[in-house]
Image (cartoon, rainbow, N blue to C red):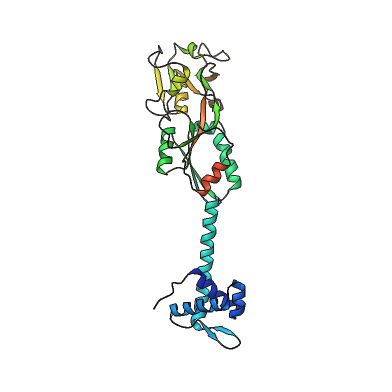
Amino acid sequence: MGGVVVELRHLRYFVAVAEERHFGRAAARLHVTQSTLSAQVQGLEREVGGPLFLRTSRRVELSEAGELMLAEARRALAQADRALKIARQSISGEVGVLRVGFSGIVVLDGVLPADLRRFHRTHPRVEISVSELPPVAQAEGIREGTIDVGYCPDLGLDDVGDLVLTRRTRTSLAVALPNEHALAAASSVTAAELAGDDLIVYAAAEGDRTVLARLGTSPEEHPARIHLVTGTLGALALAAAGAGVAIVPAATERITLPGLKLLPLRDATGVDIVTITRPDESSGPVLAFLSGHPRSPAI
């Protein structure tokens, strides 16, 4: 048996004839010639090995095999239509999955919550997952395909030329110090005024000295000790414990810890909040998410 590979169009032709009970009306409904329709149905009958219709001079009736096939053909066509619809919705970004990696500061700064809220409002059927990761791990996750978009400060990102970094906003640096510190009554401080203090500094990865560079200092030049920590909350915890003063993004002011005061650093270069993406992104939900971002200069 064989000769005609059954395709969706064969099933559509069959269902049209079964519902119209007339080849002429079915051909008009399908916008094909009656001869084309007849040939396709005959090919389908050869494929199944017997008649699907009982033809008379005035009417077309379904055979027993045709009756059984009609229900299955309708089900197959409905499933095919559903598959096409889902595929189109995925390409357009209406359904699917969006995986976001983030550093805590982007939540405090409000960038990530605003983007997710905007996207969820317009694409409620897209599943969103979020994972807190340091910047370097976000870059690796995007390369490996475990996340789709990264949100982080531009710290420790030295080797990301194969990815796209887009500046979203900038946050200044601040110092968190104990209430009993000599500078606690000041309205702001400079890095030079912290020369005698142990510094607790955020580092995106082991060996990252980006924040120190933006303070205009280095471990070799600073007379006191420098502790590098990989999380803002860890820096605040050490500062609250009296282990030194913490250099943190100014958005950290949204976290209140007893015994700590946050003061602006006047002469320090700020931190850019960036998104990290793939240059050849093809996922519908990810493209839809990115298209809703305010335009910012690429880095």
Q: Depth check: give the residue in front, 289 or 160.
A: 160
Confirm whether residue 61 shows in the render: yes
Horizontally, is 238 left or right of 60 in the view?
A: left
**Which residue appears at 58% of the width and 44% of the height?**
119
Q: How many marks?
A: 0
* Left or right relative to 205: residue 107: right
Question: x and y percent of residue 51 in the render?
Answer: 48, 83
Task: Please say whether residue 259 is visible from this viewpoint.
Answer: no
Question: Residue at (58%, 45%) from the top-left corner?
Answer: 120
* Quarter of the image that includes the N terminus: bottom left
Asked if residue 29 lies left or right of residue 130, the reply is right
Instruction: Name the image quarter holding residue 49.
Output: bottom left
Q: Position of residue 31 (x, y in %)?
A: 60, 71
Residue 93, position as x, y percentages in the image: 54, 50
Residue 20 image position (x, y, % from top left): 60, 78
Query: On screen, 293 above or below 260?
Result: below
Q: Is residue 157 above or below residue 145?
A: above
Give the quadrant of residue 255. Answer: top right
Residue at 50% from the left image edge and 69% from the top image edge: 8
Asked if 137 appears above or below 242 in the picture, the reply is: below
Give the residue furthest to the bottom. 57
